[in-house]
């Protein structure tokens, strides 16, 4: 039983220490991740932004000492349950947001994140029950071969359950990439119409735009990856216009948040709204993560779609096309 308690302790110490330290490394990006859940008023964002990583670090510290490890197990259980409920709420509302559970990330929340948390809740509850039933709190003895093996096993457990969601999503992306799509959009097929809104609140359908070749770049103001890429995306948007393409951003947020975002990044290109969760556009197009782009020509045909990153070959091909058209 001592080894099981030690295993559960190490798992949770690693999880909460890793999670809190990654959040402390970039508090700004974590704040945007918290905001993206749309669960609390804005005045609560700063307290939560600091409170969550502090609570995680406190849990890890409680678990280090045998005298306080039961409190660490119980507090860790409460934190993991709260995080899981927040993730479940996002899935129920069909929001496309980044978790931020272990700091900056490019992976959108999926049901696999709940499964990951369930694996850690099992350790937290298991450790609590073992201590309460068998009363076996014990000092960590790193010189014991058994304890060393337990620590290695716990580290492997954490590594597996923190990375398996990214692994399965990467495999899914790879399968979709082999077909040339990361969404419901299909290259060289007709583009579905979708609903947008101007910054003045007027609804319209995408098909009403008269641009010959239109690039739409979908973002959310709370997406850390969008923020990291925005300076580069703005430069590429300018290159697209120089190549004769129309370029527009589509925000999944409400007007006020989008206006702040426009001012923050000095966006001069057209910006439309498709505020989640009410606007169906993100679901209509079926993409998994933001940022996401699509190029639709004057015949209403999808010519390219996917993630605007170096990992997505069609995006790199599109950039090369722009440069060739500019130079030639």
Image (tube, rainbow, N blue to C red):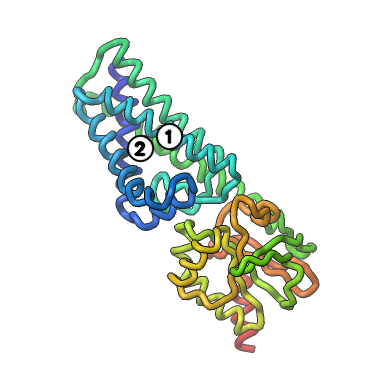
Circle 1: element type: helix
Q: Nearer the viewer, mark 1 or mark 2?
A: 1
Q: Which mark is residue 65?
A: none
Above/below status of 229 relative to 244: above
Q: Position of residue 184 (x, y in %)?
A: 71, 54
Name the residue at 28% across, 34% down: 59
Q: Is residue 8 left or right of residue 296?
A: left
Q: Is residue 42 above or below residue 126?
A: below
Task: Tell me the residue at 68%/73% (across/down).
Answer: 214
Q: Nearer the viewer, residue 288 or 200?
A: 200
Question: Is residue 161 placed above or below 311 in the rendered structure?
Answer: above
- Viewport quadrant of the N terminus: top left
Residue denoted by label 2:
15
Q: x, y percentage for residue 230?
A: 48, 68
Quadrant occupied by the C terminus: bottom right
Tell which residue pokes out farthest to the top in this image. 134
Residue 4: name its quadrant: top left
Nearest to N terminus: mark 1 or mark 2: 2
The residue depicted at 46 percent of the width and 72 percent of the height is 263
Task: Please identify the quarter of the rendering in which residue 140 is found.
Answer: top left
Residue matched to label 1: 82
Q: Residue at x 48, y 39 (%)?
A: 86
> x, y percentage for residue 229?
47, 66
């Amino acid at each position: 039983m001592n080894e099981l308690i030690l295993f559960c302790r190490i798992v949770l110490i690693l999880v909460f220490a890793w999670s809190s330290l990654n959040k402390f490394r970039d508090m700004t990006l974590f704040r945007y991740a918290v905001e993206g859940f749309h669960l609390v008023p804005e005045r609560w964002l700063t307290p939560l932004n600091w409170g969550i990583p502090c609570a995680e670090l406190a849990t890890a510290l409680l678990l280090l000492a045998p005298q306080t490890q039961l409190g660490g197990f119980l507090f860790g259980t409460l934190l993991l349950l709260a995080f899981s409920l927040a993730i479940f709420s996002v899935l129920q509302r069909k929001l496309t947001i980044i978790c931020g559970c272990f700091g900056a990330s490019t992976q959108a929340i999926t049901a696999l994140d709940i499964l990951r948390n369930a694996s850690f809740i099992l350790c937290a509850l298991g450790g609590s029950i073992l201590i309460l039933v068998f009363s076996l709190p014990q000092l960590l003895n790193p010189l014991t071969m058994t304890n060393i093996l337990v620590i290695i096993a716990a580290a492997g457990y954490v590594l597996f359950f923190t990375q398996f969601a990214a692994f399965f999503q990467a495999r899914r992306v790879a399968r979709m990439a082999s077909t040339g799509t990361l969404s419901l959009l299909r290259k060289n097929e007709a583009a579905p119409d979708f609903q947008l809104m101007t910054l003045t609140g007027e609804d319209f359908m995408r098909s009403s735009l008269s641009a010959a070749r239109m690039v739409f770049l979908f973002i959310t103001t709370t997406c850390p990856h969008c923020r990291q890429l925005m300076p580069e995306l703005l430069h590429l948007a300018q290159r697209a216009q120089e190549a004769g393409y129309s370029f527009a951003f589509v925000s999944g947020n409400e007007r006020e948040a989008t206006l702040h975002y426009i001012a923050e990044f000095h966006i001069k290109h057209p910006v439309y709204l498709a505020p989640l969760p009410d606007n169906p556009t993100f679901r209509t197009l079926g993409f998994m993560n933001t940022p996401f782009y699509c190029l639709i020509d004057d015949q209403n045909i999808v010519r390219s779609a996917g993630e605007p990153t170096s990992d997505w070959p069609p995006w790199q091909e599109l950039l090369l096309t722009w440069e060739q058209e500019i130079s030639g």
